[in-house]
Amino acid sequence: MYYFGDPTIWLPFVFAGLMGVSILIYVVLDGFDLGVGVLFPFAEEDEKDRMIASIGPFWDANETWLVLAVGLLLVAFPSAHGAILTALYLPVAIMLIGLILRGVAFEFRAKAPAPHKRLWNNAFFIGSLMTSLSQGFMLGMYVMGLEWTWLNFAFALLTAVFLTVGYSFIGATWVIHKTSDALQIKAVEWAKGGIWGLVLGIGAISLATPFVSTRIFDKWFSFPEALYLSPLPILSALLVFWLWSMLRKMPYADDRRSWQPFAAATALWVMAFGGMAYSFYPYVVPEQITIYEAASAPESLFIILIGTCIVLPTIMGYTVLSYVIFRGKATELRYD
Amino acid sequence: MELETLLLSRIQFAANISFHILFPTITIALGWVLLFFKLRYNRTGEERWMEAYRFWVKIFALSFAMGVVSGITMSFQFGTNWPGFMEKVGNIAGPLLAYEIMTAFFLEAVFLGIMLFGFSRVPNWVHTLATFLVAFGTMMSAFWIIVLNSWMHTPQGFEMIDGVAHATDWSAIIFNPSMPYRFTHMVLASFLTVSFLIAGVSAFRWLIGGRTEGVRVAMKTAIIAAAVLIPIQILVGDFHGLNTKEYQPAKVAAMEGNWETGTGVPLILFAIPDEEARENRFEIGIPKLASFILTHDWNGEVQGLNDFVTEDGEVLHPRVSPVFWSFRVMVGTGLLMLLVSWTATYMILRRKRGIEGLPKPMLYGLVGMSFSGWLATLAGWYTTEIGRQPWLVHGVMTTKEAVADVPAPLVLSTLIAYLLVYAALLAAYIFVIFYLARKTARGESIGTSIAPSPASVPKAMPAE
């Protein structure tokens, strides 16, 4: 077991990496699903069907990245799983109920009789909204160190709104890519209306994080680290600028570049996430428990790793395949 | 206050897992039943088997989705309410849960879509293979979770270092003493649940005039399967009980409502256990039968509950009434299943009349029994899970040790929210099943657009 050095060091690191990647994939992929749900009330009835069709083939697999992320937290860092989720008890419960409503609404709105469809459309919207808000709230609380004070609470409410608007933004860029005509034009407007959520959200967290802990402050604002890290904020600013100038001119006549806003939004997401991961490493519970302290015994982690090495590439490959097969504009999906 | 949190957390976990288990109970066996329909179709080329397949695959999809979303809740409950569990036995529970999650994940991503939407898009053998892999994967998922659950009842293959369990022997952990019994018992429970669901919904379609060949063949398959499986299940249940008596005698004592250790113990049919007085009121029993069932000897000695109270008064057995009653509900439902399925089979086989041999009262009875499997399965799980108390992992840690220090009102308010959502969804689920049944009985298509899950793919597949 000592092939790569001390397993109590590299195993927790590998699992933290796997978990981080799962969370990142989740917030991008389910981020656009949830965003589409949040935008639901702004769409006409027939547009709703097309919006559902644009995420229909993907949402289920997207959501399972959350299961994988939380599963990895649970099995690889059990004590952190307990500490984080106990502190976030109420928002977790709200998120779970939201996820349930959103998930079953997909099945029910297609199978239930027509008069009930409206009800399930509402369930889809409310579920997506509950999930987005509570995830944003949890993000804010996590950044502030999971302490329930009024200040942190207020900050978490802000991030809840920002993340929800941010999700609606990435959702709108997805709809731009997957639809055409009137709905696409509408989605461009939605994206223009939502981009501030992303900017303010990333801004608020970037500003708050260094002031919560001097350790994080030093990580960012000492020389030469500050120099190596400077591309991160500069690139992010350029991306925002590019996104904005693109959205102002959209939709383009030949629709060739419809994927670019989504790609740019994803890149922005990746950078924000990378910055956060850099800030918090090596802690899994901010300033309290490191990944090395929280990790399960190496022999148990090793067994899980074997399974992960088989399953993860399969899922990745499959995910790519399904996006390739369902590329292009969303069309009606049929059972047989 | 602490006790309130403990009790409310237990009720919340029970509510979540009870709601969740309803859907795997259906998908575990329904996958194999669909494979059976598919194989019959491949062999005979008869359209009726595909008709049955097409209807039930939709129920499968719906149940699968319900299982997935309610399963997500489960993976959070460990952290929100029971952080002590993973801290102490995470090294063992972790890998088992990981394999459960990954099996489910794997399946969901790859084969379910082909099974649901691929019939006309992929070669027939690929569709059959996908159906098999989904059935197999669902069963594997159940296997891993039952391994973990059984290990909590009969733990072995580990050592405690600084109060934390470390695995020493994985094959001992996986093949722990109660696992084979519990797994078999649960798989059979799933098949019985599905048999009665198919029989009930088919009887409903038959009654309202949907008398197609597909309904006929599904109903006949389900009734005969139930009739064959129920005696096997009763036998397996008996073995499971004997295994429990060996490893968790306090649970068996509570199931039997037996307070005092003795020989020639009666089998109690009815009683109201009084926890305070530590005795039964209004007891009606059959002399010596409990001794005979548990020891296979009319005068065998059976341990009573009073043996599980320590000298300083600590009670190491579960509360008696819930275990006593849920056990009786399970056995009672099982006996009713035996009666109904054998009578119906006799009516079908008599003079080879087939489904036409079933009189109206029997059809109504089958409709009423549609969800009897759920009742028996839940009652069985309550028996075994409440029966494990006060232990969470038998002899290793108590439930009280694992509970999170969350304020009771918070646990209560989330519990109420979960219950409301679950009640609404359950009503919607049952409503939609019968709605689809009515719709097909009217001869309308139910195959229109649904938001399919990932793999509704394979336009790119070869041989098209």
Image (cartoon, coloured by chain):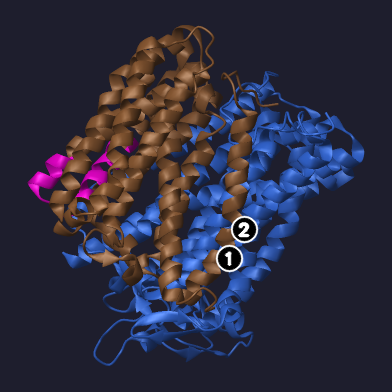
- Give, as a single range, the part of the protein colored magenta: A131-156
Q: Residue at x 37, y 66 (%)?
A: A78
B340 sits to left or right of B267: right
Q: Amino acid at mark 2?
A: Ile
Chain coloured brown in the rendered structure:
A
Please, which chain is the residue tagged with disc 2 on?
A: A
Marks 1 and 2: CB-CB under 8 Å? yes
SS class, disc 1: helix
| Crowd tier of the residue under label 1, counting other residues whose Cα lies within 10 Å: few below 14, some 14–19, many 20 or above | few
For label 1, the residue is A306
Q: Residue at x 44, y 59 (%)?
A: A72
Between residue A238 and residue A203, name the one nearer to us.
A238
When asked about the image quadrant of residue B371, the answer is top right
Q: Is residue A241 magenta?
A: no
SS class, disc 2: helix
Q: Residue A150's spot in the image, x, y percent?
A: 8, 46
Q: Residue B273's spot in the image, x, y percent?
A: 36, 71
Q: Is residue A233 visible?
A: yes
Using the numbered discs, state the Cα–Cα distance from disc 1 to disc 2 in whole angstroms: 7 Å
For label 2, the residue is A310
